[in-house]
Image (tube, rainbow, N blue to C red):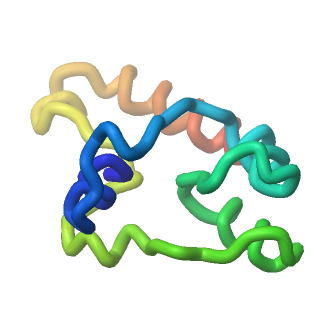
Amino acid sequence: MVPQALVDRGLTVDFFNLIYQSRPVGATSIRRRRIDAHADFCPWGELMEFKGFARKIFDGSQTRRRLSARPGGAQGLPRQAPEIVVAYLKAVVEAND
């Protein structure tokens, strides 16, 4: 989404350099001005803004593209292998806990 959003706004791909940083590292890099911007899903962007060392400059809804943060899978998977679906859902619940 990030490269497409930048290109949609007239920037060429050689204008920016995308690197991966975990959310905590990205927040620290923003705070220490080591990077110019950090892209992530909620709540990190809001947290950085709340703490006063960053501001939101772009929201994914501006892309007018459908984005999904939910898992997807084959339509027949629940019937064909219900144990996989159950194991996955248990893992999600455990991770959230």
The reply, left or right, for residue 5 in relation to residue 57 is left
Residue 94: x, y in percent?
69, 37
Residue 7: x, y in percent?
24, 55
- Specify the quadrant of the image occupied by residue 22: top right
Please tell me which residue lies in front, 91 or 83: 91
- Relative to 86, does residue 80 appear above or below in the rendering? above
Please tell me which residue lies in front, 48 or 95: 48
Residue, x 26% and y 67% (percent of image)?
9
Q: Is residue 5 visible?
A: yes
- Relative to 30, does residue 94 appear above or below in the rendering? above
Residue 78: x, y in percent?
23, 33
The reply, left or right, for residue 4 in relation to residue 37 is left
The reply, left or right, for residue 3 in relation to residue 16 is left
Residue 32: x, y in percent?
87, 50
- Specify the quadrant of the image occupied by residue 93: top right
Please tell me which residue lies in front, 13 or 86: 13
- Specify the quadrant of the image occupied by residue 41: bottom right
The reply, left or right, for residue 54 in relation to residue 62 is right
Residue, x 15% and y 32% (percent of image)?
74
Residue, x 68% and y 46% (percent of image)?
35
- Relative to 82, does residue 46 appear above or below in the rendering? below
Q: Which residue lies furthest to the left in this view?
A: 76
Residue, x 84% and y 56% (percent of image)?
31
- Relative to 41, does residue 82 appear above or below in the rendering? above
Q: Can residue 97 be seen in this view?
A: no
